[in-house]
Amino acid sequence: MTDFILNVLDQSPVTNTTDPAGAVAETVALAEHADRLGYRRFWLAEHHNTSAFAGAAPEILIGHIATKTQHLRVGSGGIMLPHYSPMKVAEVFRMLDTLAPERIDLGLGRAPGGDARTAAALQAGPKAWPPEVFPQQVEMLLQFLEDAAGLSGEAGGFPQGHPYQGIHAQPLGANIVPVFMLGSGGDGAYHAAQFGLPYIYAHFINPDNLETALKAYRRHFRPSRFLDSPRVMMAVSALAADSNDEAQYLAKPRNIWAAQMMQNRAGRLPTMAEAEAYQPTDDESALIDMIARRSLTGTPAQVLEQLDGFRNAHAIDEFFLLTLCPDPTARKNSYALMSAAAGLSRRAEAAE
């Protein structure tokens, strides 16, 4: 089982013994670590008004991390498009691609990345984009990206007579930034299929809808200028350690935090000491057990075996590993163990 394509998804988690600036620094260090380990992609999440995560501006972190790494494709997991102008997003990612050619990914999402009040505060005007116009936003973003790469007419860009024809997302360049669609339910799958984009299923958010979403994506997929046939990626909560007991111990803060999040009372990620001392209620214990079962936790061989099961059952092309752990050394070690188990660094060295 050494032919996996493994990627990293990071949220810049904050604990009660760290601060947001320290969390961002840990993300940058983790990206440099992942670059040496042979991971293909390193994506940054977008979250707003939360004490748990410091990753509010993935587009800025992408640019910084791209300068600190050599091989990784660095991207967004994702940009929450309803908050933004499609042209502005196109220009941001055109600039990123200009600075790090062919190493930038644009992952898109429709979720607000925060609560309703926060979403209102993010609005650029008196009224937010309603969810039903999301497809039009995506279409316009793709058109700006194609136009910036010099495509026109049937090849791409804006059709003749479009009101934005002649408006170019700068800086212009021949490369088209690859676009990906994220989702944890049915809508993202349908949007990915409609536009012929790769689809990334957020298993760590909603493990129960995987089969339904992938069936919808594959059934409705339309070949496009971006992709000839469906391409499926999956983001999972994963943590590996030298022994299963150690991995289960290290996963306790993640499990407690996720249970609290499901009860709408999550704060910062608990430290190892806080997690060890935590006394859950009976209801919380049931939630914690459920979260532990849906996460991939154990030795590298055990985690890889579970990934292989998903790959065989659902034809997954790539995996994103999201490792929530308050111990940065243990988090780095988890990614190192998974890289070694999957043979990532050996393949990276052979490719050079």
Image: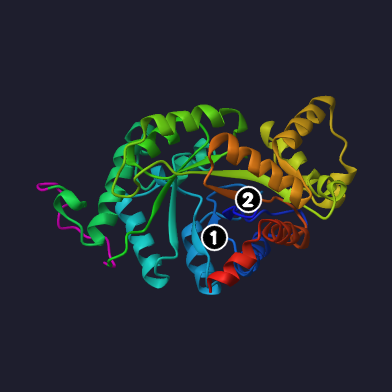
Which residue is the site of mark 2? 321
Q: Residue at x 79, y 25 (%)?
A: 283
Residue 216 vs residue 160, the one in the foreground: 216
Up the image or down, 222 lies above or below 159; here it is above
Is 236 in the magenta? no
SS class, disc 1 = loop
Majority secondary structure in the magenta region: loop
Q: Residues within 10 Å of mark 1 (few under 14, many from 20)?
A: many
Residue type beneath disc 2: Leu
Residue 274: percent from the left, percent from the top? 85, 48
Task: Identify the magenta region.
Answer: 160-172
Q: Residue at x 53, y 56 (%)?
A: 43
Q: Residue at x 88, y 45 (%)?
A: 276
Residue 268 visible at all = no
Asked if residue 300 lies left or right of residue 46, the reply is right
Q: Residue furthest left?
A: 161
Alpha-carbon span between mark 1 and mark 2: 12 Å
Residue 79 visible at all = yes
The disc placed on residue 261 is none
Up the image or down, 134 lies above or below 3; here it is above
Up the image or down, 269 lies above or below 28; here it is above
Residue 324: percent from the left, percent from the top? 70, 50
Q: For residue 335, which quarter of the picture?
A: bottom right
Residue 281: percent from the left, percent from the top? 84, 28
Up the image or down, 344 lies above or below 305; here it is below
Asked if residue 113 lies left or right of residue 11, the reply is left
Which residue is the site of mark 1? 40
Residue type beneath disc 1: Arg
> Nearer the viewer's eye, disc 1 or disc 2?
1
Residue 338 vs residue 150, the one in the foreground: 338
Residue 266 vs residue 350, the one in the foreground: 350
